[in-house]
Image: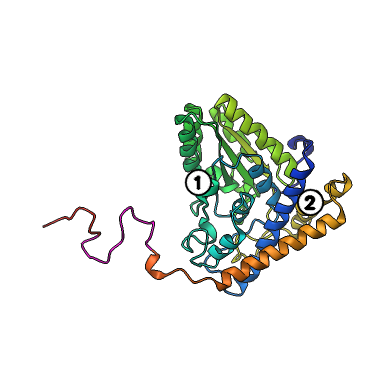
Amino acid sequence: MADAPTPQDTIPAPAADADLMRQMFATIHLIRTFEERAAEEYMRGNIGGFLHLAIGEEAAVVGSVMALRPTDPITSTYREHGQALARGSDPRAVMAELFGRATGLCGGHGGSMHLMDRERFFFGGYGIVGGSVPLAVGLGFAISYRHEDGVALVMFGDGATNQGVLMESMNMAKLWNLPVIFFCLNNQYGMGTAVDRASAETELFKRADAFDMPSRRVDGMDVMAVYQAVTDAAHHARTEQEPSMIEAIAYRYRGHSMSDPDRTRPEEEKARWHARDPLITFERVLLGEGTVTAEDLTAIRDRNSSTVEDAVAFANDSPVADDATLADDVYAHPWTDDPRGSAEMPQVRP
């Protein structure tokens, strides 16, 4: 594994509106800038817990999110800063959440691994591998039950494809004809384990064959290829009320998390994939086609840098989440220190 996709694995990039392509580039650059700064703040001790960066995977994230309607629900893995930003979440609120501040997207309770923005139909990242998959099936069921014209997309990594919950969820989605897109962002390593050491079948999109479900593999480093694949899958889900699966081959440029020194992957492999950096290659495409000018790119970079600096300043100036609120939203009833349990819960007497 870990080789660039061969031509038969890729899809020709579609023609697209120039404004959309500029927006895609700006969003890819925003995510890259945001995450690089987040890494710095982690090293400074301003971000606690785990920090999983998607640097290198931005094309797969942006291409998939922008192919959907703003009201199409999305769930994701714990590597989900980019998904939130691509969906339009406020960078200030996202950074404040990473800092554990009360002004964060989830009040400082979720942190890096559990972002959620319900107003933008982003229903969260989840720390449990494959944990977001059945939730997306539930969202797809709700769409079908209400006869809505929506599509649910679940993003998961290659490591989740060997989880039983994926098989159960795909079976249910196909059995009930639910409008769900199973999007595997295959960065080729489950933590530090290569796909070919963990999966008997390394062409992960073939998991869908067991459920008679349409599937395809795309070049996850090509934002337009991903955009076209998800556009097609969403149209299929809306018109045929049928799920499908997409496997996007990509590569993360950092270790599994900030605590991973990333010494197990071959240096020549990293160099080969760095040469296909989606930020650089897409920039060349836009310049070559005359979609942007050098001045346009400079303005985008400057704007994103200012946005991220403002987000860091906002997070630094925001109050830390109050310890008294830590149990908020954990239980259906208000938390109490009463040893008998919540006053609203039934009391058990001897």
Which span of residues is magenta-colored?
Answer: 327-341
Q: Residue at x 50, y 44 (%)?
A: 163
List the residue tagged with mark 2.
276
Q: Residue at x 79, y 36 (%)?
A: 15
Residue 215 appears in the rendering: no
Q: Quadrant of residue 154?
A: top right
- Of 170 and 99, which appears nearest the observer? 99
List the residue tagged with mark 1.
132
In the image, is 231 to the left or to the right of 179?
right
Q: Residue at x 57, y 72 (%)?
A: 316
Give the prevailing secondary structure in the magenta stretch.
Answer: loop
- Above/below status of 344 relative to 225: below
Residue 122 falls inside the magenta stretch: no
In the image, is 48 to the left or to the right of 91?
left
Mark 1 to mark 2 CA distance (whole Å): 29 Å
- Of 91 and 199, which appears nearest the observer? 91
User: Please, what is the three-letter code of the amino acid marked with disc 1?
Assistant: Ser
